[in-house]
Amino acid sequence: MEALFNEWLWQEEYWLPPGIRWRDIEVNEDEGRFPLPRDLIYTLPLAFAFIALRYVFERLIAVPLSKQLGVKDRIRIRAAPIPKLETFYKQYRRQPSPSEVATLGKQCGLSQRKIQSWFRHRRNQDRPSNTKKFREASWRFVFYLVAFTAGLASLINTPWFWDQRECWRGYPKQPVSEAHHWYYILEMGFYLSLLLSVSVDVKRKDFNEQVIHHIATLFLIGFSYCANYVRVGTLVMLVHDSSDFLLESAKMFHYAGWTKTCDSLFVIFSLIFLVTRLVVLPSRVIYSTLVVSLDFFKPFFGYYFFNALLLVLQALHIFWAYLILRMVYKFVFLGKVERDERSDEDSEVDDKEEEEEPEEEGDECSWEQRKGTINSKLASLANNCVLNNLTNQRNINSRLPKAR
């Protein structure tokens, strides 16, 4: 069965250009390392090693750093322990419909307002704290910064860094250096760790896009390594790492309340993201894989598959660029970045309602308090309207003699 699987999976027409056989790309040990599929086995234990290292890093470094920078967590009102509501919350949905609220109110002997208040407090109780978000951002910041620095150092002296035609000269018989081999293995192990831990990380509004991005990235790294698209693959990874560490650093300062520093980093990140993801990547890298590569070999399955994955990533970049431009618009016209467009899934309205909502003894008492407040505001508004009308009338009467 193993032989049958290998014969089906490693067919030459999938991985190599027409007319080239596996024996044609074999290299001697003195010529360098040639990428082999079995090398990717190391990425799975490496992913678990990244998860363990992240656990240690977040508790020994990220948490003390968050305290030093002044990260503060919001004190939230905990929902009272009501078993029926807790069961509904965990098994069905976090925000019940009006009919479900009425049914739950009858079952628990509570008013509909108290049921809604309980679910609001319970949702806020599950929202991630600023410290948790700071820990995640700081871990990604460290990796992306180290990966970008190491990747740039290993690529800046290579010919294909400056001329993308060199990515295909001599393809597919292109030996890979040890630095680029480990650059690939570490990047794939890290993204695999992100995919494995996505269920426990802060869930943001673009959760589905993030999962698609991680899966497409893993397929892209794995396939490009097996098909020896390593040269162009290193450029793709470097372009991604060039702006990611700036975004994570901006998030860190946002959670710490350093508004000016956060806004400055966000502006720098936006410029680099838009230039690298919407200009450099499509015009240099994707153009090279789509067009320039055809000068060196005829299209084959690997050509179409690799470019399809690149185009999926580019579509995600356009989506995120739209979110970034929305935030830039708010920054320019409102004077600040109000919040992350990719913020966690629960809306911030819950927090505001929780702050404004007093703890009531009963619905009737609460209604009387609210009615009194509304009446006082209406009376004040009416008085202001009357005073404005009288003032306007007086001004008009004063102008009448002149008009006559």
Image (tube, rainbow, N blue to C red):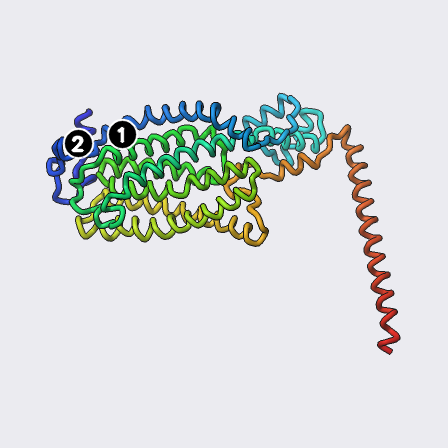
Q: Is residue 176 above or below residue 310?
A: above
Q: Quadrant of residue 143?
A: top left
Q: Element type at marker 1?
A: helix
For image coordinates 71% across by 27% down, the residue present is: 110
Residue 7 is tagged as 2
Q: Whole-Å distance between the Cαs marked 2 and 1?
A: 19 Å
Q: Is residue 175 left or right of residue 261?
A: left
- 2 vs 1, front mark: 1
Q: Return the x and y of residue 87 as percentages of the image width and height.
A: 58, 24
What amino acid does circle 1 point to?
A: Leu
Residue 187 is tagged as none
Q: Is residue 75 above or below residue 205?
A: above
For image coordinates 55% across by 29% down, the residue present is: 67
Q: Return the x and y of residue 111 as percentages of the image width and height.
A: 72, 30
Q: Are marks 2 and 1 in contact (CB under 8 Å)?
A: no
Q: Return the x and y of residue 246 as percentages of the image width and height.
A: 44, 41
Whichever of callouts 2 and 1 sits on the residue coming sooner in the sequence is 2
* Residue 340 can be seen, yes or no: yes
* Residue ID for mark 1: 40
